[in-house]
Structure formats: C-alpha cells, structure tokens
Image: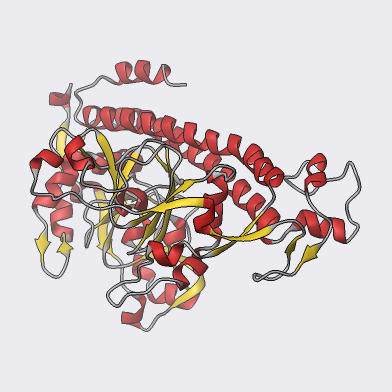
Amino acid sequence: MAGEWALTTVGEVAHRITKGTTPTTVGGRFVESGISFVKVESITDDGRFHPAKFAFIDEETNRLLERSALQEDDVLFTIAGTIGRVAKVDASVLPANTNQAVAIIRPNRAVVDPRFLYFALRDIQRIQHAHTRVVQSVQANFSLSELSSIEIPLPSKTEQRAIAHILGTLDDKIDNLRRQNETLEAMARALFKAWFVDFEPVRAKMEVRWRRGESLPGLPAHLYDLFPDRLVDSELGEIPLGWDVKAIGDLADVVGGSTPRTERSEYWEGGTHHWVTPKDLSGLSMPVLLDTERKITDAGLAQISSGLLPKGTVLLSSRAPIGYLAIAEVPVAVNQGFIAMKPRPGTSNLFLLRWASAANDEIVSHANGSTFLEISKASFRPIPVVVPNSPVMEAFDHVSRPWYLKVVAHERESRTLATLRNTLLPKLIAGELRIADAKRILEGVK
C-alpha cells in the first residue's frame, strides 16, 4: 500500500511558502484588540490555536502586512524558537496575520488536500526531521528552503480526504470536549465571582429584588436562604454578615517542594511517583493535572520534605511565571517552583482554586525578586481571603463539583482520543494502516 504512494515535498504541493513580518519593522503597531496576530505561542503542541495568546493589529497595519495575511486552509509551521508546531487556518480565526517565526504554506488544492497536508506535517517523524536541520544562533531557526524540502507521501486525493477525515474526526471529538470544558469552566468562574466577589445573592436581598421562588442565573432559589441580607465592614471592605476574613494559610496547609539531585540515577530511574514542575502546568488547557513529564523513585521522594501530596491538592506556580494553576488528580511531589495548598477540613479545594485564579493580581503583589518575581510561602500564607460561612462553602462545592468532575472526565477522554490519533497518524500517513481498518477502529470510539 505505502509502496504505491509517490513521495513529494512540501514545496511541490504548495502554491507558495512564505513567512510573516513583525509589524514594527514596516511602520505598523500592536493594539489592544483588532485583527488577530499569530505568534509561535499562539499555536499549541497538539495543532490548535490558543486565541488567548494572540496579539492584535489594526486594519492599517494589516494592509502593510498584506503579503502575509492568512487565508482559510493555510497551513502554519513554526520555524523559530519552538520548531514544528503546526496549525491549519479556518474561517473562525480570520482575518489574521503572523510574524517571521511562523511559515505560511498555501496548499495547491489541485494536488493536496489541506487537511491531509496539515496532518502529514504533524507526523512526529517530520517534526524530528525538521529538528535535525535546525540552525542554532540566538534561537533555533528552520529555513523556508528546508521546510520546502520536507518529504511527504502523496496518495490519491480520495485517499488523502479519507485519511484527513479519520484523523479529523478524532480532532473534532477532542475539540468538542474542549469546548464543553471551556463552558463548564466559565460557569464555575462566574459562580465564584457572583458569590464571593460581587456578593450578588446578598445584594439581591438588600435591594429587595429577591422573592422566594426567584433566582439569579446559576443560583437555585432555595440557596438564597444561606446568604445574609446585609454587608458589614471588614479589613477588605464590605463583606456579607457572618462571613470572615482569614489568611489563606488558615484555609490550607501551604507547602513547597524541591528537586532531587538530577545526577543521582537512583532518584529517577524507574521512578513511579509523579513529580511536577511548572512546565507540566504550562500546557494545560484546564486546571486538571493527570500526569507529569517525570517521575521519581522512593529514594527521590525521600529528598523532598513535603513528601507525596494527596490527590486534590491545589498547585500554584510561584515563579517564572506566578499563576499556573491545577488540582492534582494524582498524588504528586512538587519542585521548588510551587506553592501547594492542601485544603483543611471545611475548605473546598474548588474554592481555593477559584480564589487563587481571581486573586492573581493580589498574589503577584506579594512577590519580589530581581531576576524574576517569586512569591515565597511566608509571603503567601498571610494573604487575606473573604471566607463564607460553612453552609455557603458547602453549597459552592455541591454546585460546582459536578462541573469539575465532568471536566476531569472530559480531560481523561481527550487524552485517550489523542493517544489513538497519535498512534494512527503516522501509520495512516505512511500507508502502513489500511483506511478500512482505521475506520473500523474509529467505529469503536464513542
């Protein structure tokens, strides 16, 4: 099967291959909002766009950068800094532009299906091939000519479309789960803000907007009985009657970690305990930690004074940068780049997670450092928090826990689907797996 497929190169199936430009080099500028501007960090390792990491340019700047304006079905390939991230442009991203660290491959649709080209370039063998040709200067660089010379198989257009459909179906399932999770996360953040930042249920009672049987969005009417009907002064301003202001260190045991000596093989080889660094959190789309890049042995674990932290611990990166967040869904040991919060009895870890997200600016304001900002455990523990009474804390956990558990389940399912896609992709692209066999495998995926 594979032997029947001709080999071609990226350059031979493209109308053109070019790259973007930094706006300031042609008299343009970045703005707060406007036309999307794709950077290396705007493209994820798993082939998606990360809109929160787009920059923006205005229409005048986009006209100055007309040659690198993106079109639907363009395939992007990062060529500086991080080499080999791939994304395909769809209508939802447009209008958009990009910089010189991102190559733009405009497929010749008469020869190659754009989605097939996108998946072919995501094949790990081609990414590894690109890395062997990287030129190191201040940062890694991969030339357009080297990109053009990358070889790819070229089955018939019918087979290309079939392969793209199979792999695209798995990607679509993963994207659907991601969108569901984004909705659930938005609901949880909105609920926290309504209850614990804006005090909406309390203000509703104060303003006599509440009547039994009525409700605010996301809040069943019967829960209003848990909230007081007035605010009182506190060191943090007005807070609901009967609530308190406490230090975060009163709500959770706050601990840090360390790195066992990397040259000691007995600390690492054959390790079974999850050992987490901020890098493990940096790529998460949801605040859920299911696995870690590295694991340590019993001997390695013994070198970390905080030991193995239980499932449910809230992890907050404490430097470079401050603010990555996740709940550990497996027992973990942490390195020195974390503040780990083990909730005390009566405190929901979901409350701690949402508070740490909402209070990021306050947390950063307690940090210091010359090379990079870092917040110590001693500086973190006294940070004041508005703490609800026990019934409201329990109600928040009761309402938001099912949302969080769905997110966890979706993340596990996404990992399974991604593993299947990553297994099928090189075999399909190389022609080692028949399309009919791949379709049968796909039928078993719900």
From this view, report whether residue 75 is shown above or below residue 3: below
- Say which residue appears at 51% left-offset and 73% top-offset: 32
Residue 34 is situated, as x and y percent measured from the top left of the image, at 52, 69
From this view, report whether residue 143 is shown above or below residue 225: below
- Say which residue appears at 37% left-offset and 74% top-offset: 368
Locate residue 99: give its quadrant.
bottom left
Residue 112 visible in the picture:
no
Q: How is the image coloured?
A: secondary structure
From this view, report whether residue 350 is shown above or below residue 240: above
Residue 287 is situated, as x and y percent measured from the top left of the image, at 46, 46
Residue 252 is situated, as x and y percent measured from the top left of the image, at 49, 50
From this view, report whether residue 19 is shown above or below residue 151: below
Residue 321 visible in the picture:
yes
Q: In the rendered image, which quarter contains the N terminus?
A: top left
Horizontal side of 297 relative to 442 (left or right) equals left
Question: Foreground: 208 or 184?
Answer: 208
Locate residue 2: give its quadrant.
top left
Question: Foreground: 41 or 229?
Answer: 229
Horizontal side of 266 relative to 250 (left or right) equals left
Instruction: List the single residue furthest toward the bottom.
Output: 27
- Say which residue appears at 39% left-offset and 61% top-offset: 377
Horizontal side of 429 relative to 250 (left or right) equals left
